[in-house]
Image (cartoon, grey):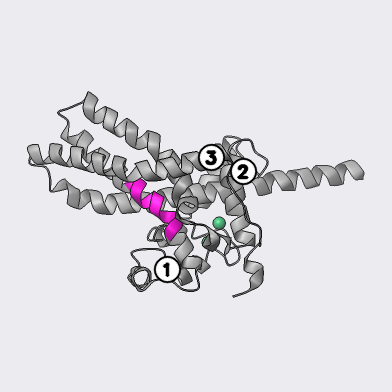
Amino acid sequence: MSSSDYSGIAEHSGPLHSFLEYSTSLIFPVLFVLNLQWAGSRLYEQDLLWLIVLAIPLGVLGGDLVSGVVHWAADTYCSVDTPVVGPSLVKPFRMHHVYPRDICTHNLVETVGNVCILAFPLLSGCLYLLWLIPDSGLLAFVVICVALTSAATVATNQFHKWAHQERVSTFARWLQRTRLVLEPRHHKLHHTEPFNMHYCITNGWLNPLLNKVNFFRRLEATLAFVGIETAKAKEKKRMLRRVSNSS
Ligand SMILES: [Zn+2]
Ligand SMILES: [Zn+2]
């Protein structure tokens, strides 16, 4: 381990952000259980409880996909100065590439709090829909998938943190060895040149498939086609303009 893996800077959230991180981290498990319990009992009433067997892998894969897409977007688009997403999303991911072990200095709430803030309206909305549409087995199944996906996404940064820690608990190491969570050597591939693959960081199950089909490069080409350019493409254009203006 190199000491340069740490910035040595202790970053603190503002009071409002900190309040939201702590309060939603406490509320998240309650909302998660309420969604599972309510939707699960509805599936049971309709003899559809077996669908949970399908919902578990879908939820885990959903979490891995969300982690990959959010991570790719933060690595590839906007800048640390972009309003709202710049300081809250882009900066932590960009800083992580420079100081990969800063994440190991975060406590549990600092690690999972940001995702809990986003999961709060989502899981509240699911409860509202269950109340609004009381007879739908399909809705109950979708709600269980969404709840499991959000739990996997909330846990992602903890798994990511474990992947960078020098020492983890025996249980965490077992989870890593069995590939149920992100394995450190697998994640190291993202921190290795060309730094543009292996974005999924829940357990990384989707990385081989997404790499094989060139998923993120195709997505970038599609977005460029509708005028949304990567930060690198914008920077390149700026440089070319500067060179042509000075000549
Ligand atoms: Zn990254
Ligand atoms: Zn990392």
Q: Earlier in the sequence, mark 3 or mark 1?
A: 3
For the residues bearing labels 3 and 1, Cβ distance under 8 angstroms: no
Kindly identify the residue that appears in the image at 61 percent across and 35 percent down: 227
Q: Give left or right: position of 98 versus 121.
A: right
Q: Residue at x 36, y 74 (%)?
A: 170
Numbered circle sitting on residue 17 = 3
Where does residue 75 sit, x and y in percent of width and height? 58, 51
Q: Are marks 1 and 2 in contact (CB under 8 Å)?
A: no
Residue 212 in view, yes or no: no
Between circles 3 and 2, the one closer to the viewer is 3
Decide which of 214, 50 is in the foreground and name it: 50
| Residue 151 horizontal/vertical position (percent) | 34, 49
Where residue 30 sits in the image (x, y, percent)?
30, 42
Magenta stretch containing residue 153, yes or no?
yes
Task: Check the image and report above or below for 6 versus 29.
Answer: below
Q: Which kind of residue does numbered mark 3 sit on?
A: His
What residue do we see at 33% from left, 72% from top? 174
Q: Using a 10 Å C-alpha cutoff, classify the residue at mark 2 as few (fewer than 14 neighbours), some (14 to 19) or many (20 or more).
A: some
**Going 66% across and 58% down the picture, which residue do you hit?**
9
Q: Main secondary structure of the magenta part?
A: helix
Q: For residue 181: magenta?
A: no
Helix, strand or loop status at disc 3: helix
- Which element type, helix, strand or loop, lies under badge 1? loop
**Residue beneath label 2, please?**
87
Instruction: Say whether residue 136 is visible.
Output: yes
Measure the alpha-carbon separation of dots 3 and 2.
Answer: 12 Å
Q: Which residue range is magenta in the image?
A: 149-158
Is label 3's Cβ within 8 Å of ligand 1?
Answer: no
Which amino acid lies under the numbered mark 2 shown in the image of this protein?
Pro
